[in-house]
Image (spheres, rainbow, N blue to C red):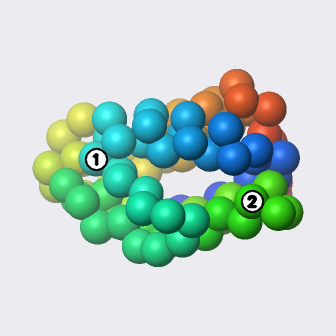
Amino acid sequence: MSKRALYTGVTPEAYNELKSKLQTYGMNLQGNSGRINEKGVNANFNYDPDAKSLEISDLSVGFPASMMINADSLMQRMNEMITKYGGRAEG
């Protein structure tokens, strides 16, 4: 089952920090929107710097990433990272 999250209050600095941290999980976010399909991690993302919002949708974790993390724990870690940098999860 895929996961979806919407974050608000995400500054460009916070987005860049999140991108750096997510690289450790095999998620390389290129630009402000697109699709990730790396090392078993799949997701769509869309960051709007003007609205300071970040949406991650259709997140799923398969092999080999599933050996280290599942979709729920990845979402929890993203929530923690966003909150640490001043953003907040909506919904």
Q: Residue drawn 19% across and 55% down?
A: 39
Of the numbered discs in the image, which one, if any, rests on residue 70? none
Question: Which residue, given by chain and number where applicable, does mark 1 sit on?
Answer: 26
Query: In the image, which is nearer the foreground, mark 2 or mark 1?
Result: 2
The kind of secondary structure element at disc 2 is loop
Tell me if 31 is positioned left or right of 90 in this view: left
- In the displayed structure, would residue 67 be above or below residue 29? above
Image coordinates for residue 10, horizontal then vertical, percent? 75, 46
Name which of mark 2 and mark 1 comes first in the sequence. 1
Mark 2 belongs to which amino acid? Pro
Instruction: Using the rendered view, name the quadrant where residue 29 is placed.
Output: bottom left
> From where the camera sits, is residue 59 visible?
no
Q: Residues within 10 Å of mark 2 (few under 14, many from 20)?
A: some
For the residue pair 34 and 83, the one nearer the viewer reads as 34
- Quadrant of the image for the C terminus? bottom right
Q: Residue drawn 68% across and 59% down?
A: 54
Mark 1 belongs to which amino acid? Gly
Question: Which residue, given by chain and number where applicable, does mark 2 sit on?
Answer: 49
> From where the camera sits, is residue 84 visible?
yes
- Quadrant of the image for the N terminus? bottom left
Q: Residues within 10 Å of mark 1 (few under 14, many from 20)?
A: some
Tell me if 70 is positioned left or right of 2 in this view: left
- In the displayed structure, would residue 40 be above or below residue 1? above
Q: Residue drawn 43% across and 67% down?
A: 43
Which residue is the extreme one toward the left? 64
Image coordinates for residue 72, horizontal then vertical, percent? 49, 46
For the residue pair 29 and 84, the one nearer the viewer reads as 29
Q: Badges 2 and 1: C-beta atoms under 8 Å apart? A: no
